Structures are given as C-alpha cells and as structure tokens.
Image (cartoon, grey):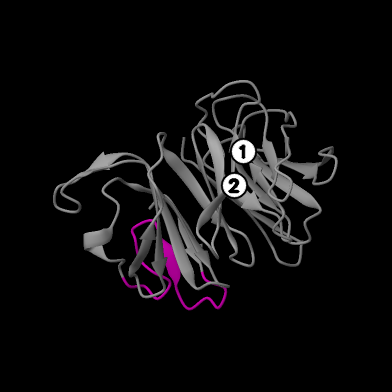
Amino acid sequence: NRTFGFSFDFDGAASGSARDPRGNYLDFNASHSAPIEQVAYSPAKNLIASCAASGYDPAITKSYERNSVKIWDANGNLLRSLPNEQYPVLSVVWNPLGTLLAYQTTVEIVVYNTDTWTEARRVPHSSTAPVTSYRETMSFSPNGTMIAAGSILESNKIQILNVVTGKTARPPVPGITRSVVYSPDGKTIALGMTDGKVQLLNATDYSYSGLLESAVNNPIETVAWDPGLEYIATGRSIA
C-alpha cells in the first residue's frame, strides 16, 4: 500500500489497496486502472477520494485511463470521476468540512468545490512556467483556508496556497521536503525532509521554529501530529 487513512471514529480505514472505511473493497469494476497514489477520507461528507496516475488494465476498464481522481461513498460505490488531467495526479486531500477537495499533479494544485463539483482553483507549482515536480504531499490547515504542499525534485521550496484568495507563497526550506502537515492548532507546519530531519515552520511567517533530529537519516515519507500537540510521529523509507 502507498497510502492509508483512518476515519475519525476509528471503525476502519481507507487504504491504497482500495478498501473503504469499513474494510470493504471499493467497486472493482469502477476502480482505477493505474496504481492508486493516495486515498483520503472525509468524515464530514462520509466520502472517499482516490487518485492515480496513468495506466492500462483491460480487466478493469477495457480502456486507457489517465491521471484520474474518483469519489466514492462509504460503501465503496463510485459516485463520480473528475475530468482526467494531462499530468500524473500524485496526492489528494479534503478540507476539514469536506466542502473542498484538493489534488495535485506534477505541475499544479487543483481545488474543487464539493457542493457543486466545480473547479475553484488551479494554481501552478512554478511562478514562471510549468515545471514537472514530483510533489506527493499536501495538507489543509485546520480552518480549511490554506494548503501546504511539499516538493521532492523541483527545489528546496514548499508551496503555500490560500484557497480563498488564490495567493501563493513559496518559502525556501533547508532541504527537499517529502512530507508536510499542519499542526492541529494551525500555528506550525511540520516538514519531513529527505535527510531524515523534521523541520518546524511558523505557519504565519514561515520562519523556522524548531528542528527534530534522530540518528536515522532515511527520508521521512509521512508526518503526523498528536492531537494534543505533544508528539510528532514519522514514517521513513527503508533506503
């Protein structure tokens, strides 16, 4: 599995192997034909979003499916497929109220209004020209107004998008970011770096507020905050 997400009542999980929050498999005949990159569950809407890059499997779709995002109900039934993208879709995330769904391709962040299922924002990663950068991590702020996105290959920068105004900041960071998450109080952004460190940023001015280090320097693939703000959990790649 590439990705995994729990529902808030912890009665199950949505997984990259295409299971719903109750542990049931999603509708096989409607599944992505490409490997699922991420899934995200919205407790507010009781919906699951999944994203995949390009792929072909006649046993599933009998056609070529490219760079897609799909929405499922909690019983694993496909509700809608969003229009295919030109570039691979690598991550997907809901805002806390479930009123916005954001996903990112290798070149841009796309935000949908989930009440009307219309596109609300489309913001490129680069301020000058489309640059294919493999960003596989995003996080909504607790108030649902900001999105933080990390970068793997493009540069030592993260991207902060205000979904209300459309304004974007690209603060530099000391290394390449593999994972990013807002703290539960929205005051701090934790960045999992390729050098095995966790960098803490002030969520307002993006100044450095802390650095967590360990003896293991494998890249940090995922970061999670304790709801009480006392602990940060990290997951690392093997090599």
Q: In the rendered view, does 66 fall on the left or right side of 85?
A: left
Residue position marked by numbered label 2 in the rendering = 138
Q: Is residue 200 left or right of residue 21?
A: right
Q: Position of residue 195 (x, y in %)?
A: 62, 32
Taking the spot 38% from the left edge, 53% from the top edge, the residue there is 1
- Crowding at dot 1, Cα within 10 Å, few <14 / some 14-19 / many 20+, comes out as many
Q: Secondary structure at mark 1?
A: loop
Residue 113 colored in magenta in the image: no
Residue shown at the point (21%, 61%) measured from the top left: 29
Magenta stretch prevailing secondary structure = loop
Residue 154 vertical placement versus 84 (above, below): above
Q: What stretch of residues is rendered in magenta?
A: 7-24
Q: Is residue 22 magenta?
A: yes
* Amino acid type of the residue tagged 1 in the rendering: Gly
**What residue is pinned by disc 1?**
150
Asked whether the residues under the numbered discs 1 and 2 touch, taking CB atoms below 8 Å apart as contact, a structural biologist would say yes
Give residue 122's position: percent from left, percent from top: 57, 40
Amino acid tagged 2: Met
**Which mark, by number, is residue 16?**
none
- Where residue 44 appears, as percent x and y from the top left, is 58, 73
Decide: is 178 above or below 14: above
* Sequence-earlier tag: 1 or 2: 2
Tell which of 134 and 223 is nearer to you.
Answer: 134
